[in-house]
Image (cartoon, rainbow, N blue to C red):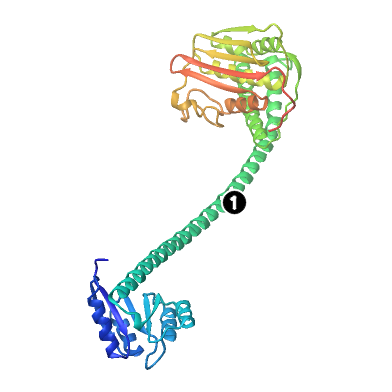
């Protein structure tokens, strides 16, 4: 305790005050002493000067020590208070300690050693209490801050939850709207395709070359438009959780040949070579045949669309754990690494510009990804710019049960 202590002595007896001053000077403590004859003067001094410790006579002319201590503590004063009295009384000592006194001693037992010991002990306790109060206040402030932050986080969580509900509702309305519009568009489109096919067949009368060309143009563009509408309808059905698989047993080998036969016209228009290798002893699987056919058509259509020359290979292999792998590989334009992560997202294409060369909604791969997931499988892609792309689909030979998204 090297710092200088400022001690306030409150006692109406000048002899006692002189004794305390004399004893204090004989202690190893560095201390200055200020005197007050009564409680009123002491209050004025406490209000105007900083003190480290108080020596208080139990009996004062204007109050008693017990009342004085209670009043100081009530006002928030936490300075150590050592009470002196002319007569020792255990009950009085207990009352003083309960009121907030730091210690109690009879004047007859005063000495430099006891005075030094009392001050050291009182100051040690006082500083420990100060640290405790500071820590409690800091903890209180920290808890208050945490409560405020937790409340802010809760408010943000509720706001995000509300926004998510609104987004889900808006997405549901969008899906229902697209499904309705797509359904309404298919009826007139099918009529256009039917009438254009009749015109091309010339069963109702001959057409000149220009008219035949126009009828063929109507049919081709109508078919493309119907394909786009079907993609939108499928995507909206998937997003609204209304798409159901209808599994049954069928032969994958037969399905592959059927798909290749139907897509022969697309391949021949671009003079591409297409090869199929089905490495299956038993091609029978239990799954949704129509949806697997849709997956194959989507992957082959993409391969044909983005390949101007070279080959397209489709390979089917049997894997362990009762599953199949279907690989569609092309020698097309390829996909950049930074675009691979987003190609299975709806309405995304490698070329997003208005003047892009390859038309389409960008839903084919998103639909394919969703259908493969429904079939309890997964799809991966690897690609190099200018070298081509390879899509691999793995599905179980037999799905456990019809699934719904």
Q: Is residue 350 visible?
A: no
Residue at the front extreme of this rendering:
108
Q: Is residue 129 visible?
A: yes
Instruction: Identify the residue at image location x=42%, y=82%.
Output: 69
**Percent from the top left, x then y, of residue 362?**
55, 28
Q: Is residue 318 left or right of residue 43?
A: right
User: Is residue 256 placed above or below 70 in the rendered structure?
Assistant: above
State which quadrant residue 284 falls in.
top right
Asked which secondary structure carries label 1, the reply is helix
User: Is residue 168 placed above or below 386 in the rendered structure?
Assistant: below
The front one of 110 and 255 is 110
**Percent from the top left, x then y, of residue 237?**
68, 34
User: Is residue 345 placed above or below 12 in the rendered structure?
Assistant: above
Q: Quadrant of the C terminus?
A: top right
Instruction: Identify the residue at image location x=62%, y=44%.
Output: 168
Residue for badge 1: 162
Q: Quadrant of the N terminus?
A: bottom left
State which quadrant residue 22 falls in.
bottom left
State which quadrant residue 401 falls in.
top right
Q: Is residue 171 left or right of residue 331?
A: right
**Percent from the top left, x then y, of residue 208?**
63, 14
The front one of 314 and 189 is 314
The front one of 344 and 161 is 161
The front one of 161 and 62 is 62
Number of dots carrying numbers = 1
Q: Residues within 10 Å of mark 1 (few under 14, many from 20)?
A: few
Instruction: Identify the residue at image location x=36%, y=71%.
Output: 122
**Percent from the top left, x then y, of residue 207?**
66, 15
Residue at the right extreme of this rendering:
248
């Amino acid at each position: 305790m090297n710092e200088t202590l400022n001690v306030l002595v409150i006692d109406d007896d000048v002899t006692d005050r002189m004794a305390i001053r004399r004893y204090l000077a004989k202690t190893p403590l560095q201390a200055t002493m200020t005197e007050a004859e009564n409680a009123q003067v002491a209050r004025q001094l406490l209000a105007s000067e900083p003190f480290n410790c108080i020596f208080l006579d139990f009996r004062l002319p204007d109050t008693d020590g017990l009342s004085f201590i209670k009043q100081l503590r009530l006002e928030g004063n936490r300075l150590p208070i050592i009470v002196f009295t002319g007569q020792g009384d255990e009950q009085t000592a207990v009352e003083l300690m309960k009121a907030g006194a730091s210690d109690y001693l009879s004047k007859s037992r005063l000495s430099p050693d006891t005075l030094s010991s009392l001050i050291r002990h009182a100051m040690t306790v006082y500083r420990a209490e100060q640290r405790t109060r500071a820590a409690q206040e800091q903890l209180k402030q920290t808890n208050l801050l945490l409560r405020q932050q937790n409340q802010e986080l809760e408010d943000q969580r509720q706001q995000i939850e509300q926004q998510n509900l609104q987004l889900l509702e808006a997405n549901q309305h969008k899906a229902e709207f697209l499904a309705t519009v797509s359904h309404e568009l298919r009826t007139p489109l099918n009529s256009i395709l039917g009438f254009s096919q009749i015109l091309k067949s010339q069963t109702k009368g001959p057409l000149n070359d220009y008219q035949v060309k126009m009828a063929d143009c109507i049919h081709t563009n109508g078919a493309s438009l119907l394909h786009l509408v079907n993609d939108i309808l499928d995507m909206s059905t998937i997003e609204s959780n209304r798409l159901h698989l209808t599994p049954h047993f069928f032969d994958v080998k037969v399905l592959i040949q059927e798909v290749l036969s139907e897509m022969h016209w697309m391949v021949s228009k671009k003079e591409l070579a297409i090869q199929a290798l089905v490495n299956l002893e038993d091609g029978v699987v239990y799954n949704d045949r129509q949806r697997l056919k849709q997956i194959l058509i989507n992957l082959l259509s993409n391969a044909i669309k983005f390949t101007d020359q070279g080959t397209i290979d489709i390979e089917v292999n049997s894997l362990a754990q009762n599953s199949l792998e279907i690989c569609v590989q092309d020698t097309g334009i390829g996909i950049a690494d930074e675009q691979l992560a987003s190609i299975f997202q709806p309405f995304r294409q490698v070329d997003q510009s208005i003047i892009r060369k390859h038309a389409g909604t960008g839903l084919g791969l998103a639909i394919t990804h969703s259908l493969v997931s429904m079939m309890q499988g997964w799809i991966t892609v690897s690609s190099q710019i200018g070298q081509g792309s390879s899509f691999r689909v793995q599905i179980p030979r037999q799905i456990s049960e019809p699934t719904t998204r």
